Amino acid sequence: MHEHLRTVADAVWAERKPSVRYESWTRVSDRVLEPYGLVLKGGIWYVVARAGEAIRTYRLSSIQALIVLDETFTRPRDFDLPAYWAAATRRFERDIYIGTARVRATAPGIGRLKTISDTVRRAIEAASPAPGPDGWAEFTIPIEEVGWATREMTRAGCEVEVLEPPELRAAVADVARRMAALYD
């Protein structure tokens, strides 16, 4: 369990504002939050909170320091945590997928690719890839940057082959060569 989970949960329940030192992707900053709710996703805890005028999602493990203030707030009656989370997840996935990859996959490979994210799963389902007589189907999926995509494609093992873009194909081939060298 994360060190700040109980404290943030208590702040949510009591509608008390915590002051946090938060490390985002770009910087460390101090903020006072109005925590509306907690979400557990993929084993990672997040707090959905208002900071200033914006409602955002904060990963608990990125909170470096936390002090619960005596100051209280009132959570809006119409705030719907599940609806907010679903919309925020869709926005996040839409924003991080910056490109596409043309892949070839077996039926088990298609299944593995569908587990990457809801966005990838929806793209695969929309493409309706069906393996041909050789057992392979060709289709396009959304991807993040090449480093991330390389990890995801290599997780699928020999059930997925990256055809394009060339830089992703080369990166996956490099990982495969290095792995093969370990077992020679």
Image (cartoon, helix red, strand yellow):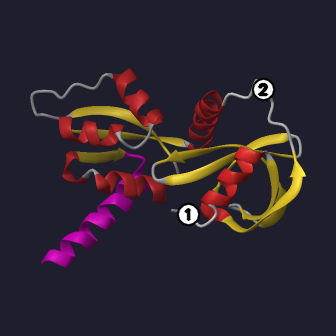
Q: CB under 8 Å between callouts 2 and 1?
A: no
Q: Indicate the quadrant where residue 22 lies.
A: bottom right
Q: Which of marks 2 and 1 is nearer the N terminus?
A: 1
The residue stretch that appears in magenta: 164-184
Q: What element carries label 2?
A: loop
Q: Position of 160 compared to 127: left or right?
A: left
Residue 181 sits in which quadrant?
bottom left
Q: For the residues marked 2 and 1, what is the alpha-carbon distance in whole angstroms?
A: 28 Å
The overriding secondary structure of the stretch rendered in magenta is helix
Which amino acid does the dot numbered 1 rest on? His
Q: Which residue is drawn at 55% across and 42% down?
A: 97
Q: How crowded is mark 2: few (under 14 residues within 10 Å), some or many (20 or more)?
A: few
Write down the quadrant of residue 50 in the picture. Answer: top right
What is the number of the mark on residue 2? Answer: 1
| Residue 122 against residue 38 in the figure, above or below | above
Apparent side of residue 132 relative to residue 45 in the rendered image (left or right): left
Mark 2, residue position? 77
| Location of residue 136 in the rendering, given as x and y in whole percent from the top left corner | 18, 35
Q: Could you tell me if residue 33 is visible in this image?
A: no
Q: Position of residue 28 (x, y in %)?
A: 77, 68
